Image (spheres, rainbow, N blue to C red):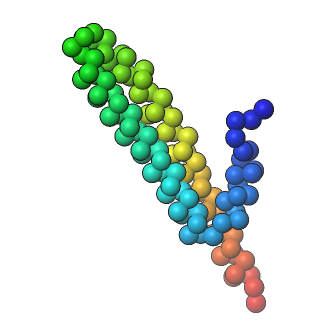
Amino acid sequence: MTCGPSKEERYEKIKAMSHEERMTYSKKYKQTAMGMMGGGVAMFGGMVGGLWGSIGGGAIGAAFGASAGLVFGACGPLQYSKEILEWDKELEEESAKEVKEEP
């Protein structure tokens, strides 16, 4: 049982898009990742500040545990954004070759 679409399914979806659509799609995923990272850092700071008075240095551990999911969870959308850009480069090179080969 898979957690999401396979690499081949993702590639076919990207292949069906135009260059501009792929760039927009990649940008959306990159912004999602940056938002998650920013949210994780903000959560860390807020929790440390809020808990420091009651549990002291343990607030750092509690805050890290709570914010780690957001910070490290952002790796998925960020990697997918990079993957889209790589596939876009390949697809654009293929289409440029096809145009050159036509008489």
Task: Determine the residue located farthest toward the left in the rendered image.
Answer: 53
Residue 88 position within the rendered picture, expressed as x and y whole percent measured from the top left:
61, 62
Q: Where is residue 80 in the image (x, y as percent from the top left)?
A: 58, 48
Q: Eyeballing the image, is 80 above or below 86?
A: above
In this view of the protein, which residue sits in the foreground, 84 or 68? Answer: 68
In this picture, residue 78 sits left or right of residue 11? left
| Residue at 54 percent of width and 63 percent of height | 23
**Residue closest to the eye, 22 or 52:** 52
State which quadrant residue 49 falls in: top left
Which residue is at a point 56% across and 69% down the rendered structure image? 20
* Front position in the image: 82 or 23: 23
Q: In this view, does 67 lie to the left or right of 59?
A: right
Q: Where is residue 26 in the image (x, y as percent from the top left)?
A: 54, 56
User: Quadrant of the image for the N terminus?
Assistant: top right
Dividing the image into 4 quarters, which one contains the C terminus?
bottom right
Write the residue at 74% across / 44% down. 6
